[in-house]
Image: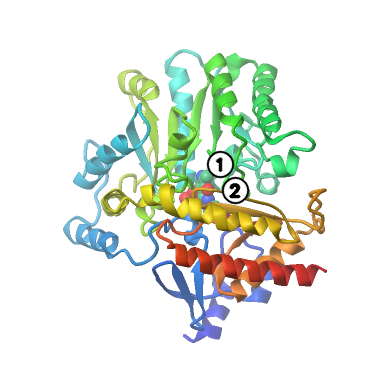
Amino acid sequence: MNKSQLQQHDRNHLLHPFTDFHDLAQQGTRVITAAEGVYITDMDGHQLLDGMSALWCCNLGYSRSEITTAIHQQMQELPYYNSFFQCTTTPSIELADVLTKLTPVGLNNVFFTNSGSEANDTNLRLIRRYWDLLDQPSKRIVIGRNNGYHGSTIAAASLGGMSGMHKQFEPLDYVEHVQQPYWFGEGGDLSPEEFGLRAARSLDEKIQQLGPENVAAFIAEPIQGAGGVIIPPESYWPEIKRILAQYDILLAVDEVIFGFGRTGQWFGSDYYDLQPDLMTFAKAITNGYFPLGGTMVGDRIAKVIKSKGGEFTHGFTYSAHPAACMAGLATLKILREEKIIENVRDNIAPYLAKRWNELADHPIVGEARSLGLVGALELVKDKAGRTRFDDQCTAGGICRDMSIKHGLVMRATGDTMIIAPPLVITTAQVDELMEKAHRALDDTAKAMA
Ligand code: PXG
């Protein structure tokens, strides 16, 4: 099929995720046909620097044959077997072993799923099971955050705090939400640190309102990803930890985006010194090459569910798929042997931070923030007042299109521009990214003038 035939069939038959189907039919889709290193290529031969690592997952870029070879070899040897009914496979045991060594202390068990959403559903099941087995059945409510993202199944989307999603289904009635630590958008006249404490204390207020005896767990991303790369003020996480300890509430940290090196540490939990009871992962564990997710289960929970109460009635056909686990093992081997994360921490992240911060001087940028290998730009009409151009987020849409035109995949969440490039990006490629982002901003400023 040629390009227009492909687009026609796409329009006719393929329902894309998170898409306005009517708009997509007007605009047509971009057919991505190849990728190499940190670049993707579309059917017209247009090459783009992938500033988003696909969907925050191809952290090692697109050319790691070690991972594809590992998958291929596993497929030839044992393409699939399950881990139900007292069966298991070698790759799944080996990956579980490696994960318990790499993840924060006290996370010594793993439950594998196919995606981050399923892993967060699994968290919900584990949380409920844990408190039931401890004879504290009133502890039912899980608290998430406004504008958090935890996936798209009913449970995961309920845990998330995306109001646009909640309007399209009935969220679970035992999930509540508290304020997000988004200083630029919600901090008003407070300093970032004052605001960080205030956002954390919205959790305390919610717990008191619900009754601590009814609250089972709190779930959060270390830094919100899909919500707009919301880096919490330094005061935020220590206060959250204090509150959870005070009321004996479990902590589930969703590391689907920040796990496996994005902060320059193995996990966001390492960066913020968190000791999660549950830790969700997906995406970069296989470098995005094969679907795999899961949740690391803390000793406190594992001890109870392993010693009491019989069967845990939960699992997926493809939990611990051997080829997915081989992809995970190959990915983690590269991350370790090539010291990719150390290089992010010591070289690339400081360089990106320095260059990204220069964009704060651009006339339409109200804030440029970065941490590790994520960055965000707040597009504004008036810098001092943090005033947006309009309510329709026109500037974000234009900036994204301009960015693509100049050969850079940069995402827009409303009027917040986001990057999360592969961890293997070089300093020269960071320079290229910056130049393209700058041109996109200039064009956006012109269009919005
Ligand atoms: N938790 C977090 C923190 C995520 O970012 C999920 C769970 C769900 O994972 P699955 O594998 O079920 O998709 C995610 C996924 C975006 C974007 O545009 C972000 C995600 C997925 C698709 C798009 O930022 N995050």
**Residue 104 placement, left or right of 391:** left
> Is ligand 1 within 8 Å of the beta carbon of the residue shown at mark 2?
no
Of all residues, the one furthest to the bottom in this rendering is: 2
The Cα–Cα distance between marks 1 and 2, rounded to whole angstroms, is 7 Å
Q: Amino acid at mark 2?
A: Val
Judged from the image, the secondary structure of the residue bearing numbered disc 2 is loop
Contact between marks 1 and 2 (CB within 8 A): the answer is yes
Tell me if mark 1 has few (under 14), some (14-19) or many (20+) residues whose alpha carbon lies within 10 angstroms of its own: many
Q: Is residue 424 left or right of residue 31?
A: left
Q: Which residue is mark 2?
A: 229
Q: Report which quarter residue 312 is drawn in.
A: top left
Residue appearing at x 39%, y 23% in the figure:
301
Q: Is residue 287 left or right of residue 412?
A: left
- Residue at image mark 1: 223
Above or below: residue 8 compared with residue 127:
below
Q: Can residue 292 be spotted in the picture?
A: no
Q: Secondary structure at mark 1?
A: loop
Instruction: Provide residue 421's location: percent of width, then percent of height.
Output: 49, 59
Nearer the observer, 141 or 312? 141
**What scheme was used to colour the molecule?**
rainbow
Q: Residue at x 38, y 51 (%)?
A: 343
- Return the x and y of residue 195 as percentages of the image width and height: 70, 32
